[in-house]
Image (cartoon, rainbow, N blue to C red):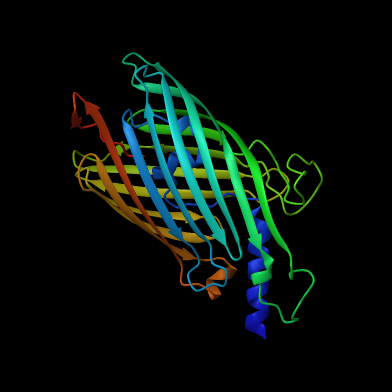
């Protein structure tokens, strides 16, 4: 009975939280388009990145998230476009999201190596929740039986991103709308409902320090703010890169988890990474942790050939 009640409580809690927050990724630096449309074109070549997260292993209703993104500058290098598909599943609820992004980039500095980018994104989310599949202690519980949700929600976001090959700093609001899930005509409702999305403010930054010729040290951070609806959350990360090929990193997400990352630049264009999260929240009693894997490829076509990017990307 305790296990049954725990399962119901966890799944229901996750269902409510799912409408308020985006899926989280520990390797957010490699998945920049997910949190900021102004990230579009930042590799200065066509980039394709895929990432998968298997969260809270062994916990009931565990979240699973995946993202596939591509972005590139156009012939007019001040303009960049991007496209990203996101999938997120928590318990009996799931979302499919598709967003297109546009960024306008302004080079600054004596050598034009710093870029200031303004970005917009637009798309839609399909949210589904089948509460019929929730196991309850009372068969035919009217709160769940025959209760399912299928909503199409609009997406509109914006962001600012400043970067070079040495640093990055950004601010974004991925979701300007605050749609509810209460009915087919309540997409733009302003009513105070728990099952809704909220505005989330994201701040990111990082810097590359050279420790000799063969070692780089990259501290970075992500701050998440949901005004008046959730506690402030932040990620802090420290990464070492050896001979521009092997990466080792550690991180901490406030009152949630420690994470440990390893990555390899198989070539200057192809990167593979894995991250493990060790939970320290109350959920640590019910899970062995979370797993994340990422693949990324940079390439440019020039006269029918693929050539290397201008410089190795660290984020």
Q: Is residue 9 above or below residue 66?
A: below
Of all residues shown, which one is farthest toward the front? 146
The foreground one among 22 and 257 is 22
Q: Quadrant of the N terminus?
A: bottom right
State the image quarter where residue 78 is shown: top left
Percent x, y of residue 180: 73, 47
Looking at the image, which residue is at 79% across and 41% down?
190
Percent of width and height locating residue 137: 72, 82
- Closer to the camera in the image, 110 or 88: 88
The image shows residue 300, relative to residue 127, as above or below, that is above
Is residue 131 toward the left or the right of residue 106 in the image?
A: right
Question: In front: 107, or 177?
Answer: 177
- Asked if residue 144 lies left or right of residue 235, the reply is right
Residue 310 visible in the picture: no
276 displayed left or right of 181: left
Residue 205 is situated, as x and y percent measured from the top left of the image, at 46, 37
Q: Residue furthest right?
A: 191
Which residue is at 31% across, 37% downward?
209
Q: How many marks?
A: 0
Q: Relative to 273, is 215 above or below? A: above
Is residue 78 visible to the viewer in this orientation of the structure?
yes
Screen quadrant of the C terminus? top left
Q: Is residue 74 left or right of residue 4?
A: left
Which residue is at 80% across, 71% downward? 142
Residue appearing at x 53%, y 71% in the figure: 284
284 to 244, vertically: above or below: below
| Location of residue 12 in the rendering, given as x and y in whole percent from the top left corner | 68, 66
Q: List the single residue furthest toward the top.
A: 110
């Amino acid at each position: 009975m305790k296990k049954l009640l725990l399962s119901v409580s966890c799944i229901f809690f996750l269902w409510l939280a799912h409408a308020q927050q985006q899926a989280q990724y520990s390797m957010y630096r490699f998945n920049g388009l997910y949190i900021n449309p102004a990230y579009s074109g930042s590799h200065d070549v066509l980039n394709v990145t895929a990432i998968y997260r298997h969260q809270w292993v062994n916990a009931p209703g565990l979240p699973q998230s995946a993202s596939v993104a591509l972005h590139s500058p156009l012939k007019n290098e001040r303009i960049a476009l991007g496209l990203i598909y996101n999938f997120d599943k928590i318990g009996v609820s799931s979302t499919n999201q598709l967003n297109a992004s546009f960024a306008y980039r302004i080079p600054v500095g004596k050598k034009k190596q710093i870029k200031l980018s303004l970005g917009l994104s637009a798309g839609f989310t399909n949210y589904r929740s089948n509460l019929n599949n929730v196991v309850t202690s009372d068969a035919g519980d009217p709160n769940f039986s025959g209760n399912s949700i299928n909503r199409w929600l609009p997406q509109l976001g914006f962001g600012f991103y400043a970067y070079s090959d040495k640093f990055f700093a950004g601010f974004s609001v991925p979701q300007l709308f605050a749609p509810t899930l209460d009915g087919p005509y309540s997409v733009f409702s302003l009513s105070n409902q728990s099952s809704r999305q909220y505005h989330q403010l994201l701040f990111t930054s990082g810097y590359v320090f050279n420790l000799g010729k063969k070692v780089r040290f990259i501290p970075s951070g992500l701050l998440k703010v949901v005004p008046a609806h959730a506690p402030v959350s932040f990620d802090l990360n420290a990464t070492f890169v050896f001979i521009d090929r092997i990466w080792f990193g550690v991180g901490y997400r406030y009152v949630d988890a420690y994470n440990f990352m390893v990555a390899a630049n198989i070539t200057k264009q192809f990167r593979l990474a894995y991250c493990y999260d060790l939970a320290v929240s109350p959920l640590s009693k019910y899970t062995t942790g979370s797993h994340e894997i990422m693949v990324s490829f940079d390439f440019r076509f020039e006269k029918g050939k693929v050539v290397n990017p201008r410089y190795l990307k660290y984020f």
